[in-house]
Amino acid sequence: MTINAVRACLLSRAIGLLVLPVLLSAPMAVAQESLRVGVYHNPPKLVADDDQRLSGIMGELLIAMAEEEQWELIPFTCEFQECLRALELGELDLLPDVAWTSERAELFAYHQEPVMYSWSQLYQGEGEPIEALFDLEDKRVAVVSGSVQERYLRNVIQRFDIDVQWVGVASFAEGFLAVQQGQADVAASNHLFGVWRADEYGLHETSVIFQPMRLFYLGAPNIDPQILARIDAHLVRWKENPESIYFEIMSAWNGQRQAPRATHFHWGWWALALFALLAAVALGVWAIRRRGLSQKPSPEFLEMQSRTHYLAYYDALTGLPNRRFLIDSLRAAIDRDARVVSFSAVLVIDLDNFSRINDTQGHDSGDCLLVSVAEQLRQRLADQGTVARLSSDEFAVLISELGAEQHSAMQAAERAAGQVLEAVSQLRNGQAVPVGASIGIALFNGHDPTTDSVLQQADIALQQAKRLGGNRFAFFNGEMQASVLERANLEADLHHALARAELSLHYQVQVDHQGATVGVEALLRWQHPRRGWVAPDIFVPLAEETGLIVPIGHWVLASACQLLGQWAQSPTHAGLSVSVNVSAVQFQQTDFVRDLEGLLAQHQAPPGRLVLEVTESLLMREPVRIRNVMLRLRSQGVRFALDDFGTGFSSLSYLKRLPLDELKIDQSFIRDLLNDKADAAIVDTTILLAVSLGLTVVAEGVETQAQFDWLKGHGCYRYQGYLFGRPVPLDALFAPPEVTR
């Protein structure tokens, strides 16, 4: 698509919204002190008693919050799916006991602190211990029909070819009863129900743990964010005190289980569950081997040996060889090529934007896509070489014995890459979203390469293909290696730049239509001791990729707050604002709000003079959570500006839902607005749109008097650009050259 076509598309979208000014400025619904709470029967976490009152762990915790907050809870009994539908329609305000998923996060509002953690587990009575999934061979497994436990277990049992007899039941209690009465050998259950009722049925937990999850009070899309913030505040405070009502309720419902000594629940619980699952598998294999050492190997044991080999060398989801298999095959190819003087090739394939499919469609849809890709690669390339799955959405193809002539070997590898691109492009996931792939190709001929170096070269070429826009292939060459080394050296230097005081802030003034300075934007600069000035568009993305943007961003915010605190004491500067760009990585930090509030208080900076500039791409990431963070800071007085407006792809409908104060028109539209009618129309429409939303418009990149006059005549009254001043250090900020207007 051409630039003009893109601009025309943006213009069409913007104009379409302008015909709905009433809708755009409509106030959002705000939850009242009375909260309508959905209740579905899922003991011990959530229970509706005979009088339709809330009970269970999460019910009683919510009642305790309501007593302190003076909320009136109005419970409504419904089936789980009915509750979700009512919540989506705004007929309910809260629904307790809901696991976090990316799909729900797009529709509903989550608070941040999980109420509790949960997982599923297998329970058994007397008999031979169930220590691993393989021990379910020829066992009767009771599982709730249609449950997440059934779906998970059926999938994994099928992948490992374990013969299981399924016993369908209607509830966890019925499953436990089936084991107690000898109608089943094991039962699948949520572990909280197991803790609560297993002893009553004479059952005990096995080592098989699966599906860890975080549980929340799910909020309606239009719920007042302050309600969710208060829920978080109670949970954090209670969890810090082992004597709190939180642990009293947990202990009461958990029976013999005592309150944890730890003061916080962390992601370590997830790691613990995963470790237990892996340990159970390892223990099962160990037990089988131990039995085999004490007697002559049985046919069953030799079945198990084959299965262990399969698990070691093949991918459970797709059935393709895994990384270990590929590395062994690659090592053999290198040795063979050294003897026969022949080229081979490795193609590393990565699906473009696969994470988007997982986030928007769900992991089941993503898994189906991976299986389809694996099947396509197997059909088209298995007769040419080894097709393997390396990780997540990354595959590889090893093609050996391509001959001694490099050019013909490259042509053969190129044809294989073309087959991959064609095969993947024909696949579409469940909602007809196009699928593409990026491919990195490395040739080798046995002259002192190693498996690590070959795979590294292919990966470097893959990154090059992605940088070129994706859905293409690239061959490794020496220039790429040099580029990678250069990037690695720059990253190493960036790790020390803050400590060595190489980073600094320059400030660019923002002026109003009368030319008076109304604020400044803080811009990050890096003076490298050997390279000189490093461009921000080079080192800022690097800082985001490596996570260094978190300490660097904290330093920038601290500097801005310190400056605002100093200016607050000066009559001539007290009215100025400071704008700071905030990275998506910073917004993802759980302590971002707390840290910023601390900086404002430490430096006695007026929050209303701090403007955080965010991008459209940031707003598209976890929009509900981002909005809640913005609202928390907005309640303190902090202002927000949408930076580079018109260059992203977010829905303009977000503008009416977010607490924005400013809209910054990207300089790419300002540059040619006097010569390009499409740019002029986009800028004019954006100004009108912002006015209808009550937002201040800031034009970036204003460099000429003619641009200034046009913008002023079309209703834009705040500007930033070289016409008014270049970014300069703080000590030179208020001594710019005179500008005639």
Image (cartoon, rainbow, N blue to C red):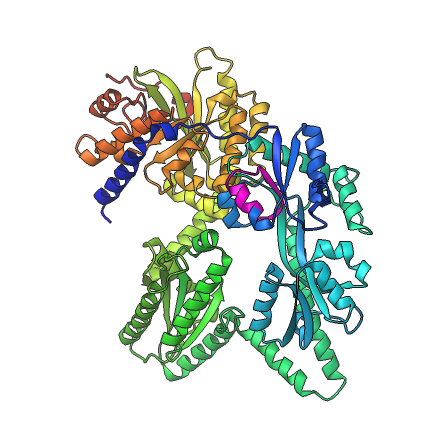
- Foreground pick, 658 / 309: 658
Residue 304, picture quadrant:
bottom right
The residue lying furthest to the top in this view is 571
**Residue 476 visible in the picture:** no
Relative to 544, is 381 on the left or the right?
Answer: left
Callout count: 0
392 up-or-down from 387: above or below: above
Image location (x, y in percent) of residue 341: 36, 81
What residue is rendered at 50% in x and 30% in y?
A: 29
Magenta segment includes 585: no
- Foreground pick, 495 / 625: 625
Image location (x, y in percent) of residue 287: 73, 75
The residue lying furthest to the front in this view is 51
286 up-or-down from 193: above or below: below
32 up-or-down from 396: above or below: above
Image location (x, y in percent) of residue 112: 59, 40
**Quadrant assignment for the C terminus:** top left
Relative to 228, is 548 on the left or the right?
Answer: left
What residue is rendered at 54% in x and 26% in y?
A: 635
**Residue 630 visible in the picture:** yes
Magenta segment includes 85: yes
Image location (x, y in percent) of residue 162: 62, 75
Residue stretch in magenta: 83-100
- Foreground pick, 694 / 438: 694
